[in-house]
Amino acid sequence: DEYQIVEFTALNLRPLGLTTYRISYSGPSPQDHKQVALESSKFVQAMNAATIAISNGQDLVVTFDRQSGQMQTIGDVEVFAEWGYYVPYDAFFDGDGQNSGAYIFRPSQANQTLKMMQPCPEVQFIPTSVGVEVHTSYGDDPNNCWVQQIVKLVEGHPWIEFEYTVGPVPIENGRGKEVVSRFVASGIGNNGVFYTDSNGRAFLKRTRDYRPSWNYSEIYEPVAGNYYPVNAAIYMEDANASLAVLTDRSRGGSSILDGTLEVMVQRRTVADDSRGVDEALNETAGG
């Protein structure tokens, strides 16, 4: 059941070109290779019992908590990466009303706060020849972990890469979950303003609880009503700093609270929203 992962830096890639790599193994068995000690990695800038600072070999330095694996700072800006979920509206539990489903996102309570997930105890910091990976998992409690996350800092890349597998999303209590990855930079005072891309082209200014073309005075859905399509990126900024999240596929995203960006990455509902599919968005696999 074991497997090996090969990582290397591909150089001199031509725009719109194609480069093929053929990899074959010749040498001692993988068991004979000794993993590089974390403290010996050139990408580890500092380490103590509480925190570890990891770089991309250049100017980007990110600090992590050694016990939970959670990100703490990017450079000198405090930034946390969190997981949580909204409970979708279900008329069976919440009374007559519009269900959340394939076409409609609607929390069970209009002003519902994000239900935060807890980091699980197993954390791995894995040094490689091209950087460092931080493996963590999250769940409703430390004994029920159903989100796996890998944070990568790669040599020469001026960004932080997040990979994740979500699910299967548990629904033992009969309620679905709308799963969100949230980034918190409380030092950025965006004052309800954030930006999302227009299908990968220009960025559009979004203001929480506001529409430029009509009077948005009666706010019925303060969470769902502030979600926007995110096809490529979402960001927020103030005069001193900015934070951007780039996605590899279309998502929904928002800044529900100042100093935060959130992106919805997985949904599982148990009720149909009656908009044509005629079935619940009951995603039973992980992804």
Image: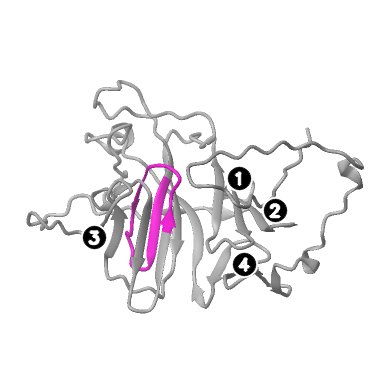
The residue lying at 25 percent from left, 53 percent from top is 226
Mark 2 vs mark 3, foreground winner is 3
Q: Are marks 2 and 1 in contact (CB under 8 Å)?
A: yes
On residue 64, which mark appears?
Answer: 4
For badge 3, the amino acid type reads Lys
Number of numbered discs? 4
Report the residue marked by disc 3: 205
Point out the tag, 4 or 2, that comes first from the N-terminus.
Answer: 4
- Label 4–label 3 contact, CB within 8 A: no
Q: Which mark is residue 83?
A: none
**Label 1 neighbourhood size at 10 Å, few (<14), some (14-19), many (20+)?**
many
Question: SS for tag 4?
Answer: strand
Q: Residue 145 got which mark?
A: 1
Distance from disc 4 to disc 3, alpha carbons, whole Å, reads 32 Å
Question: Mark 4 against mark 2, which lies toward the viewer?
Answer: 4
Residue holding disc 2: 122
The part of the chain drawn in magenta is: 245-264
Residue 125, by quadrant, is: bottom right
Closer mark to the observer between disc 4 and disc 3: 3
Amino acid, disc 4: Phe
